[in-house]
């Protein structure tokens, strides 16, 4: 039987209960997901039903539904999908009209192309503003360097230049999947993809790293917008940097 978004609906196997089949020593992914949705709402990342989050653990992917207020999501609202096939294994029985997130194919890009354990999608105002900065518009990528919070991203240091690819927005969320995948392949070091006038997709090896990456990026986007407003160039090393090489300038 085919369900929403073309995914096949399967009955939960009573011998392998989906909601409690998580690795020993790990937190319950459904409780983590609902808690993070509330926190993301508090931060202004997922207002007006926009944005979302998905977690992958073992053979399962846990995903918030589409078009709902993220701060009000309950554990029994969460969809569970097969991490390999993308089939819906468990859907909310109490609300048959709920649909799996439209971000689903984009979350799976992070799982399949980066082996991520979590992917976060925000509609953060500063992320949207960052996509419209002149330098970002010109190069179709966001670049920033010599700021302390860059060190919060895996594999990056203060002197590095962080580059986040920018893709054009589309009318429907799932239509972004192809462009996102291509950007991820071209920018293999990037932990995220920006969507013009839309928001951000960021990922990590687990939800802790994905949240850290997203928080650091949101900070950097905000600083970039502020520096641009002040006439400062956030894409280049400061002139008085004693440890910077000539190549930094």
Image (cartoon, helix red, strand yellow):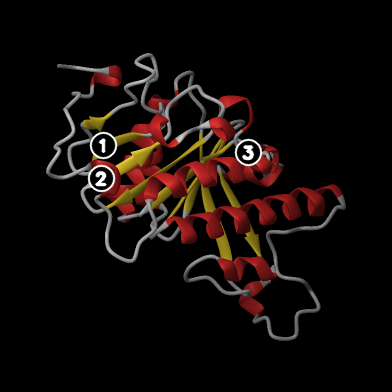
Q: Does 204 appear above or below 59?
A: below
Q: Nearer the viewer, residue 229 or 60?
A: 60
Q: Does 58 appear above or below 194?
A: below
Classify residue 6 as left or right of residue 210: left
Report how far apart the C-alphas of labels 1 and 3 lie in the structure: 24 Å
For the C terminus, the image quarter is bottom right
Residue 162: image location, x then y, percent: 56, 61
How crowded pointer 1 is (Cα within 10 Å; few <14, some 14-19, many 20+) is rated as many
For the N terminus, the image quarter is top left
How crowded pointer 2 is (Cα within 10 Å; few <14, some 14-19, many 20+) is rated as many
N-term mark: 1 or 2 = 2
Q: Nearer the viewer, residue 204 or 200?
A: 204
N-term mark: 2 or 3 = 3
Quadrant of the image occupied by residue 17: top left
Task: Give the residue at mark 1.
Answer: 81
Task: Give the residue at mark 2.
Answer: 60
* x 68%, y 81%: residue: 244
Task: Give the residue at mark 3.
Answer: 41
Quadrant of the image occupied by residue 238: bottom right
Residue 121: image location, x then y, percent: 51, 40
Q: Secondary structure at mark 1?
A: strand
Report how far apart the C-alphas of labels 1 and 2 lie in the structure: 6 Å
The answer to whether the residues at label 2 and label 3 have Cβ atoms under 8 Å apart is no
* x 62%, y 25%: residue: 48
* x 39%, y 18%: residue: 95
How crowded pointer 3 is (Cα within 10 Å; few <14, some 14-19, many 20+) is rated as many
Q: Secondary structure at mark 2?
A: strand
The answer to whether the residues at label 1 and label 2 have Cβ atoms under 8 Å apart is yes
């Amino acid at each position: 039987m085919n369900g929403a978004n073309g995914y096949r609906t399967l009955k939960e196997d009573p011998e392998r209960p989906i909601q409690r089949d998580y690795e020993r020593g790990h937190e319950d992914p459904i409780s983590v997901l609902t808690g993070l949705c509330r926190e993301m709402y508090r931060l202004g990342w997922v207002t007006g039903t926009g944005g979302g989050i998905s977690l992958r653990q073992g053979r399962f992917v846990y995903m918030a539904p589409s078009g709902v207020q993220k701060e009000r999501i309950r554990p029994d609202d969460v969809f569970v999908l097969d991490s390999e096939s993308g089939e819906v294994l468990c859907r909310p029985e109490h609300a048959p009209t709920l649909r799996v997130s439209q971000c689903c194919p984009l979350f799976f890009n992070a799982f399949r192309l980066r082996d991520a354990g979590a992917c976060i999608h925000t509609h953060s105002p500063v992320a949207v503003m960052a996509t419209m900065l002149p330098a970002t518009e010109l190069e179709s990528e966001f670049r920033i360097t010599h700021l302390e919070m860059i060190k919060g991203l895996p594999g990056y240091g203060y002197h590095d230049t962080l580059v986040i690819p920018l893709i054009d927005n589309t009318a429907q969320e799932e239509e972004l999947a192809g462009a996102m995948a291509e950007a991820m392949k071209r920018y293999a070091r990037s932990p995220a993809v920006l969507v013009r006038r839309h928001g951000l997709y960021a990922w990590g090896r687990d939800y802790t790293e994905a949240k850290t990456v997203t928080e650091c990026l949101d900070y950097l986007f905000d600083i970039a917008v502020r520096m641009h407003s002040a006439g400062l160039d956030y894409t280049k090393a400061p002139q008085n940097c004693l440890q910077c090489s000539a190549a930094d300038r």
